[in-house]
């Protein structure tokens, strides 16, 4: 059971990291609204702000994963 849970956590993390890496055009490890809009034009500023849990104006890997889990951002 622990192995399955750990595998699920790792896969979820890799999914968020994979999307973030694809969208992060400048390679700084965070996603700006412009980067997200370039990859997902349907995500507007209001939705981006809803994903930005700490309101710092960018999305980190944890915020991307949470947005994906909530269905706010595609997983691929």
Image (tube, grey):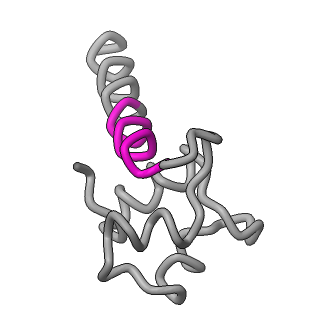
Residue that extends furthest to the top in the rendered view of this protein: 3
Q: Is residue 36 left or right of residue 54?
A: left
State which quarter of the image contains the N terminus: top left
Residue at 71%, 70% (x, y): give it.
57
Coordinates of residue 62 in the picture (x, y in percent):
56, 46
Q: Quadrant of residue 5?
A: top left
State the residue in front, 44 or 24: 24
State the residue in front, 35 or 58: 35
Q: Is residue 17 magenta?
A: yes
Q: Is residue 55 magenta?
A: no
Residue at 22%, 49% (x, y): give it.
76
Magenta residues, start to end: 14-24
Q: Quadrant of residue 14?
A: top left
Coordinates of residue 43 in the picture (x, y in percent):
38, 79
Image: 42 above or below 8:
below
Residue at 43%, 36% (x, y): give it.
17
Q: Quadrant of residue 2?
A: top left
Coordinates of residue 74 in the picture (x, y in percent):
26, 60
Residue at 77%, 66% (x, y): give it.
56
Main structural element of the magenta stretch: helix, strand or loop? helix
Coordinates of residue 16 in the picture (x, y in percent):
40, 42
Q: Is residue 76 left or right of residue 64?
A: left
Residue that extends furthest to the front in the rendered view of this protein: 26
The total number of labels drawn is 0
Image: 33 above or below 24:
below
């Amino acid at each position: 059971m622990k192995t399955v849970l750990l595998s699920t956590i790792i896969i979820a993390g890799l999914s968020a990291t994979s999307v973030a890496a694809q969208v992060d055009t400048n390679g700084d490890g965070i996603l700006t609204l412009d980067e997200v809009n370039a990859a997902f034009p349907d995500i507007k500023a209001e939705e981006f702000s809803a994903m930005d849990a700490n309101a710092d104006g960018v999305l980190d890997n944890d915020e991307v994963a949470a947005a994906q889990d909530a269905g706010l951002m595609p997983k691929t």
